[in-house]
Amino acid sequence: MNALGMIECLNIPKGIEAADAMLKAADVSLLTAQTVCAGKYIVLISGDVAAVSAAVEAGAVVCGGGLIDKLVIASIHPQVLSAVVACSDVPEPKALGILETFSLCVAIKIADAAVKA
């Protein structure tokens, strides 16, 4: 995987429609498409940077005014992807940092920056 792309939509039906548009717009792989809390829907895709960028833009257009956020990370750190698609245990943490965001896209950007630091 070269890039990770994501849209976050305030409308579940529009989110599903956006996922369809994203997969039709470019040669990308669907990692997940799901509700994340009441009324919010996310779509995560992967592929080469150009395809992911085109697909994210197609999804954003479909979401319209219901788009919360979107992201494309050209070289996502592997630990971030594991954390996004599954839960993992942290063996005996010595310290814990907590950041709270409204947007899950922002949370992924922060996680990627943190593990690359």
Image (cartoon, helix red, strand yellow):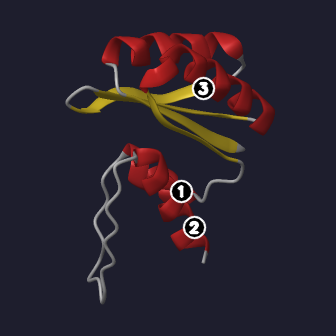
Q: Is residue 73 above or below residue 48?
A: below
What amino acid is labelled 1 in the image? Lys
User: Does dot 1 land on a helix, a strand or a loop?
Assistant: helix
Query: How far is mark 3 from mark 1, CA to CA?
Result: 20 Å
Query: How far is mark 2 from mark 1, CA to CA?
Result: 6 Å
Label 1 sits on residue: 109
Q: Is residue 24 visible?
A: yes
Mark 1 crowd level (few <14, some 14–19, many ≥20, 10 Å Cα): some
**Residue 13 image label:** none
Q: The C terminus appears in which quarter of the rendering?
A: bottom right
What amino acid is labelled 3 in the image? Ser
**Residue 113 image label:** 2
Q: Please state if 23 lies on the left or on the right of 84 as rendered.
A: right
Front label number (3 vs 1): 1
**Residue 29 image label:** 3
User: Does dot 2 land on a helix, a strand or a loop?
Assistant: helix
Q: Position of residue 113 (x, y in %)?
A: 57, 67
Q: Residue at x 60, y 37 (%)?
A: 5
Q: Position of residue 61 (x, y in %)?
A: 59, 18
Q: Position of residue 68 (x, y in %)?
A: 44, 35
Q: Is residue 57 above or below residue 105?
A: above
Q: Residue at x 28, y 65 (%)?
A: 89
Report if the CB atoms under discs 2 and 1 are less than 8 Å apart. yes
Please name whichever residue, 30 or 104, is drawn nearer the observer in this view of the structure.
Answer: 104
The picture quadrant where one finds residue 115 is: bottom right
Q: Is residue 28 visible?
A: no
User: Does dot 3 land on a helix, a strand or a loop?
Assistant: strand
Farthest residue toward the bottom? 94
Q: Is residue 42 above or below residue 23?
A: below
Query: How far is mark 3 from mark 2, CA to CA?
Result: 23 Å
